[in-house]
Image (cartoon, rainbow, N blue to C red):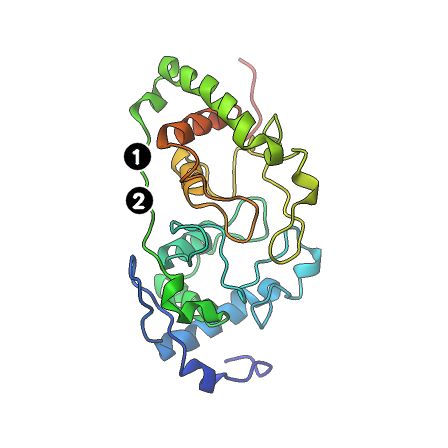
Amino acid sequence: MLSPTMPPRLPALCLLILATPLGAEEPAPLDFNLYMQGRYVFERNCIVCHGPRGDGNGELSPTLKPRPRSFREGMFKFRTTPLGMLPTDDDLRRTIRGGLSGTAMGMFTQLSDEEVSAVITYVKSFSRRWRKAENYAPQVTLPPTPAWFKEDGARQTHVVAGAKLFAVNCATCHGDKADGKGPAAVALKDIWGHPAAPSDLRQPHLRCGDAPGDLLRVLATGLNGTAMVSFDQTLTEAQRWDIIAFLMSIRLPSGPVLGG
């Protein structure tokens, strides 16, 4: 049954244009049945953190750090689309399925594919940005990990180059040690007015993902709503891979290291 505290928003929903095929530049009409199923899924899995209005003010939100995402602005950090653009459905699906390390956003692996698609449709109803075609963009094409990444000797040269690039381009926020304690870190806030401390990039598990390609995606697309911009135009592909090689070289172990 649907929550009696949430009256249907049928007039507004008749105007919503939501579901978007991968790479499409135009919104597609709302599937109302999928929306209603998504509302059911949201109320039973998401509302306690994200709130009944999708504004991140759920019952548990005051106790959580970082605070749950507000969907009202239509700004999503983790995407394969250019900076400022809406994510694809697959981007949202990856976050729902994989969770976000270091946050209260867990892995919703118990949901069926249909339920995930449904809740994505419902989440889109919270922001008007999903109704406007200019907010959509195709995925950014990302190159594969270079062959030298798997060769210890060759990779070390790139690690040295990456450390220098990191010091110039990233250390102001992330710190010389990549621990998230750069001189600008304390003053950073996101568009929601919350403190936005830069990530400790040494951690074994990052919110964007753990693979080199996940780091490349963030360098290419940035993180919407934060001070983390896209370096697509300021760093070459080779320079971005060098920085990633450096970050992978200083990553902390994910568990206890047993002596030999």
As helix, strand or loop, the secondary structure at mark 1 comes to loop
Q: Residues within 10 Å of mark 1 (few under 14, many from 20)?
A: few
Residue at 58% across, 72% down: 52
> Residue 219: which quarter of the image?
top left
Q: Residue furthest front?
A: 234
Which residue is nearer to you in this view: 251 or 71?
71
- Tell me: residue 201, above or below residue 96: above
Residue 252 appears in the figure: no
Indicate which disc residue 67 carries.
none
Residue at 45% across, 67% down: 129
Q: Position of residue 245 (x, y in %)?
A: 44, 25
Type of residue at label 2?
Thr
Q: Which residue is mark 1?
A: 144
Residue at 46% across, 72% down: 125
Kindly report which numbered mark, 1 or 2, lies closer to the viewer in this rendering. 2
- Numbered circles on residues, count: 2
Q: Position of residue 189 (x, y in %)?
A: 65, 50
Which residue is nearer to you in this view: 246 or 102?
246
Q: Residue furthest bottom?
A: 11
Q: Is residue 122 left or right of residue 175?
A: left
Q: Position of residue 108 (x, y in %)?
A: 47, 56
Residue at 57% across, 46% down: 227
Q: CA distance from mark 1 to mark 2?
A: 10 Å
Q: Which residue is mark 2?
A: 141
Q: Is residue 32 left or right of residue 5?
A: left
Type of residue at label 1?
Pro
Q: Position of residue 166 (x, y in %)?
A: 52, 27
- Tell me: residue 156, above or below residue 39: above
Q: Are marks 1 and 2 in contact (CB under 8 Å)?
A: no
As helix, strand or loop, the secondary structure at mark 2 comes to loop
Q: Residues within 10 Å of mark 2 (few under 14, many from 20)?
A: few
